[in-house]
Amino acid sequence: MTEQHEKDWELYEEKIEKFIQVIAKNMNLYGITSSIGRLYGVLYFSGDPMTLDDMRDALQMSKTSMSTGVRTLSDMKMVESTFRRGIRKDLYQSEEDWYKSFTSLFGNRWRQYTESNIEEADETIAELRTISEQTRDERLQSKIDQDIERLEYARNYYEWLMEFIHVIESGKIFEYIPKK
């Protein structure tokens, strides 16, 4: 390989590595560590499925870390296991459809928190109603009534958010904002 070719390859690798860093940084928005984000980036740009050993070599991380990262990405439907004749080790490749990955990741993360918030609002409303029924303090009853209104507003918001999550998860979002 000529010296210029080597420089071109180095420049190419530098630019890809820079973009992988951007991917890793953005994954933090979804609660994914930057090391797992880097793993996804390496898989995405590899072009070919990789074994855990390949990933370990590419990222200089332990095989255990690679396994944990692949499992995390697999749970989020961002990486899938694949098969190639003659290769006995597990092979993994990135999900190429980022729209699919986003809708799955967004839905899973937001659904979990939103359902929890709805449950908390319901429990708090029920507990406040119990306190209101038991107290003779009219000022406290008035405050509880105001807070129950606030909690019902919050619950309505979370129910709306659940509908929004459904629009994302079902793919209906693409009727409003088409894929590019």
Image: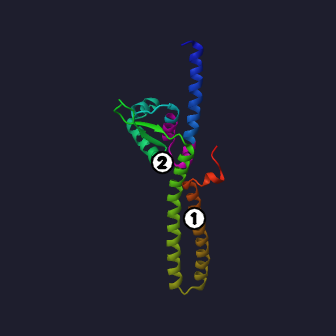
Q: Residue 122 location in percent, x, y?
A: 51, 72
Looking at the picture, which amino acid does disc 1 mark? Tyr
Q: Residue 79 location in percent, x, y?
A: 47, 41
Residue 90: name its quadrant: top left
Quadrant of the drawing holding the C terminus: top right
Is the image coloured rainbow, by chain, by secondary structure, or in one colour?
rainbow
Q: Nearer the viewer, residue 168 or 83?
A: 83
Which residue lies at the image location 41% right of the left edge and 40% below the top edge?
81
Specify whether residue 38 is painted magenta.
Answer: yes
Relative to residue 154, is residue 65 drawn left or right? Answer: left
Crowding at dot 2, Cα within 10 Å, few <14 / some 14-19 / many 20+, comes out as some
On the image, numbered disc 1 is attached to which residue?
Answer: 158
Q: Judge depth for marks 1 and 2 and give the one in front.
A: 2
The vertical placement of 101 against 12, above or below, is: below
Crowding at dot 1, Cα within 10 Å, few <14 / some 14-19 / many 20+, comes out as many
The vertical placement of 15 against 175, above or below, is: above
Q: Nearer the viewer, residue 6 or 85?
A: 85
On the image, numbered disc 2 is attached to which residue?
Answer: 76
Disc 1 element: helix
Main secondary structure along the magenta-highlighted residues? helix
Disc 2 element: loop
Specify whether residue 148 is painted magenta.
Answer: no
Magenta span of residues: 26-42
Residue at the left extreme of this rendering: 88
Can you tell which mark lies on residue 101? Answer: none
Which residue lies at the image location 50% right of the left edge and 41% below the top edge?
95
Callouts 1 and 2 close, C-beta under 8 Å: no
Q: Residue 52 location in percent, x, y?
A: 40, 34
Q: Residue 96 location in percent, x, y?
A: 53, 39
